[in-house]
Image (cartoon, helix red, strand yellow):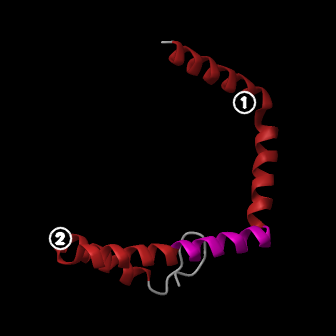
Amino acid sequence: MRYRLTFAVGLVVGYVLGTRAGRERYEQLKKSARQVAQNPAVRNTAESAAQNGRAYAGKAFHAVSEKVGDKMPDSISERVRGLRERGQGAEDDWGTSNT
């Protein structure tokens, strides 16, 4: 009960402080976030992280598929194959290549 009350109080305090900050503060935060997202260093780091993530995911997929072998249901194998084919040469949501 104590945790619920603490959560509710935190929710109310957050709401009150958020409404007092108003639209002006929201616009400032939005502008700052946009500037950070458009920073070339941030974009390069995000693209590098995405490429590294895809590389590690590919290695993990191969390691798991070697261990699982024929035990994987055909429906899953077809789904993974379809996702891999669909992703070839396309761009993801971040505008980076799927290489």
In the picture as drawn, the residue positioned furthest to the bottom comes out as 89
Relative to the observer, which residue lies in front, 39 or 58? 58
Residue, disc 2: 73
Label pair 2/1, CB-CB below 8 angstroms: no
Where, by quadrant of the figure, is residue 77 drawn? bottom left
Residue annotated with mark 1: 18
Q: Is residue 3 above or below residue 19?
A: above
Q: Which residue: 82% across, 39% down?
A: 24
| Highlighted magenta segment, given as a residue range | 39-53
Q: Position of residue 51 (x, y in %)?
A: 58, 77
Checking the image for residue 39, the label placed there is none
Sequence-wise, the earlier of marks 2 and 1 is: 1
- Going by the picture, which residue comes out furthest to the front? 67
Where residue 89 sits: x, y (%)? Answer: 49, 87
- What amino acid is at disc 2? Pro
Report the front residue among 93 and 41.
Answer: 41
Secondary structure mainly formed by the magenta segment = helix
Q: Who's the residue at 78% across and 60% down the image? A: 36
User: In the depicted view, which residue is nearer to us: 64 or 18?
Assistant: 64
x, y percent for residue 46: 66, 69
The correct choice, above or below, for 73 with respect to 97 in the image is above
